């Protein structure tokens, strides 16, 4: 009999958590610290993992290679992002979602003011890299890691000790990821039990269509768009998705792209994608590539516009698509961040920001699906970029080749 691996136990914890949460109900929240501990362990890995893997990965690229990697990464990220917006807006527009929804008396939700785009751009460049590392500011860390890696490559042999040190840190972090994952079944069980126990099924009834459309849009992206793109690029789509399935499962339970990054990097490496490609593409994706979040924001904006009786025109739909895509770029990969960024989309089409209170109660339920798609998109982009760069991939991943 085949021994159950860590992923098998995680799936068992996932299923048992749903069952226990439904049976026990709200008292199950007493085990919330077990789930919080798991998320904290994953977050512990984020900064050293991103910095060491990205800096060491970039240091192996020449100037032309680095330019191609950056161009391809953003091309694939925003190609899928545009497709995601089209899928979401077609579904929302055809359904009439939100029409006649009882708005009732809204409680004002305190939303952090949106920073200007210029300020966001300037904030990417750290004035103190050590401070950014300490605070876990991902975008400045990514910027500093990239320029440091470029400088290591330019310095040549004299920088080999620093390059070797970063590679050693990266390998050590991969091992640490493996240790943390063995706590995964307990953490996933606790997270799912608390979610189901807290919300139950009653909260789903008034929002059934919204939840259904968000999950349907994400399912179309996951099972339709991504496989089609991989098939087009000569990759066996469902074989690859099966190889990296631990990543969307973790994302579904943690609702955090950043916390899932160590798992995504592990499964992509185990699927046969070279370290340097994973180290370059995935850390950026965990921060700036959010297809699921963009679809959630687009559908939610249409839902609230209809609920408030705002007549949407073609111009509104275009604005929703553009702003939702840009907002998804700036959405931090942590639970609930998409709800804050939704205010930008609502403001662009004249929907009262207070409408976020309508969504807030079920945001966690919507967050689970969109985060799973976010991390899957990162993994799909990684294998496609690896293929186009001529990286040596296992023949079992390539269309027309037998599965070994």
Image: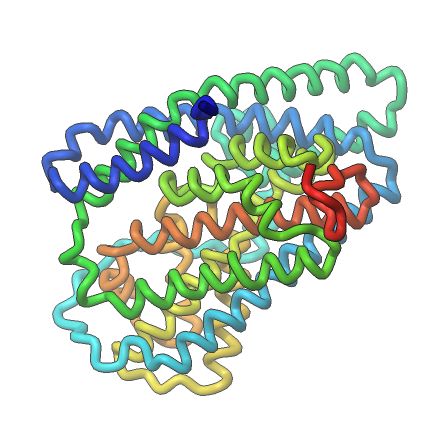
Q: Residue at x 74, y 37 (%)?
A: 394
Residue at 66% across / 28% down in the picture?
Answer: 53
Nearest the viewer among 243 and 139 is 243
**One can see residue 180 in this view:** yes
388 horizontally vs 377: left or right: right
Eyeballing the image, is 44 above or below 353? above
The picture places residue 372, in percent across and down from the top left corner, at: 45, 48
Instruction: Report whether 181 appears left or right of 399.
Output: left
| Colour treatment of the image | rainbow
Position of the C terminus, as image quadrant, is top right
Can you tell which quarter of the image residue 51 is in? top right
**Residue 198 horizontal/vertical position (percent):** 17, 44
Number of numbered discs present? 0
Question: Where, by quadrant of the figure, is residue 212 drawn?
Answer: bottom left
Res 128 visible = no
Residue 38 in the image: state x and y as whole percent. 36, 27
* Residue visible at 26% across and 65% down in the picture: 354
The residue sitting at the front extreme is 1
34 vs 229, nearest the viewer: 229
Q: Is residue 359 above or below residue 46?
A: below
Frontmost residue, 145 versus 31: 31
Note whether 401 is above or below 211 in the view shown. above
Residue 371, above or below 2: below
Q: Is the N terminus in the top left, top right, bottom left or bottom right quadrant?
A: top left
Answer left or right for 219 relative to 268. Answer: left
Q: Nearer the viewer, residue 205 or 51?
A: 205
């Amino acid at each position: 009999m085949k021994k159950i691996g860590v992923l098998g136990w995680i799936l068992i914890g996932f299923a048992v958590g749903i069952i226990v949460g439904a049976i026990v109900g709200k008292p199950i929240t007493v085990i919330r610290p077990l789930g919080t501990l798991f998320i904290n362990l994953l977050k512990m890995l984020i900064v050293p993992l991103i910095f060491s893997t990205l800096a060491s990965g970039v240091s192996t690229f020449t100037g032309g290679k680095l330019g191609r990697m950056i161009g391809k990464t953003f091309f694939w990220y925003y190609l899928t992002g545009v497709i995601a917006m089209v899928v979401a807006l077609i579904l929302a527009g055809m359904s009439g979602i939100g029409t006649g929804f009882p708005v009732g008396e809204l409680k004002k939700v305190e939303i952090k003011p949106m920073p200007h785009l210029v300020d966001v751009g300037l904030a990417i460049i750290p004035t103190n890299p050590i401070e950014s590392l300490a605070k876990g500011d991902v975008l400045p860390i990514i910027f500093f890691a990239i320029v440091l890696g470029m400088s290591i490559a330019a310095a040549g042999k004299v920088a080999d000790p620093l390059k070797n040190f970063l590679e050693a840190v990266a390998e050590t972090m991969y091992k640490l990821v493996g240790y943390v994952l063995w706590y995964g079944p307990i953490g996933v069980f606790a997270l799912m039990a608390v979610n189901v126990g807290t919300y139950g099924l009653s909260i789903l009834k008034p929002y059934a269509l919204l939840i259904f459309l968000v999950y349907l849009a994400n399912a179309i992206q996951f099972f339709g768009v991504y496989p089609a793109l991989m098939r087009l690029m000569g990759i066996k789509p469902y074989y690859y998705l099966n190889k990296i399935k631990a990543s969307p499962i973790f994302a579904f339970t943690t609702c955090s792209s950043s916390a899932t990054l160590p798992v995504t990097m592990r499964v992509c490496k185990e699927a046969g994608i070279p370290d340097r490609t994973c180290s370059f593409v995935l850390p950026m994706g965990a921060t700036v590539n959010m297809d699921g979040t963009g679809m959630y924001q687009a559908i939610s904006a249409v839902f609230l516009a209809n609920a408030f009786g705002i007549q949407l025109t073609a111009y509104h739909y275009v604005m929703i698509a553009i702003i939702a895509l840009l907002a998804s770029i700036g959405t931090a990969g942590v639970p609930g961040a998409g709800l804050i960024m939704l205010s930008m989309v609502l403001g662009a089409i004249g929907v009262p920001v207070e409408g976020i209170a309508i969504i807030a109660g079920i945001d966690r339920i919507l967050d689970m699906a969109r985060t799973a798609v976010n991390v899957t998109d990162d993994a799909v982009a990684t294998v496609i970029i690896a293929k186009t760069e001529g990286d040596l991939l296992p023949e079992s991943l390539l269309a027309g080749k037998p599965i070994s």
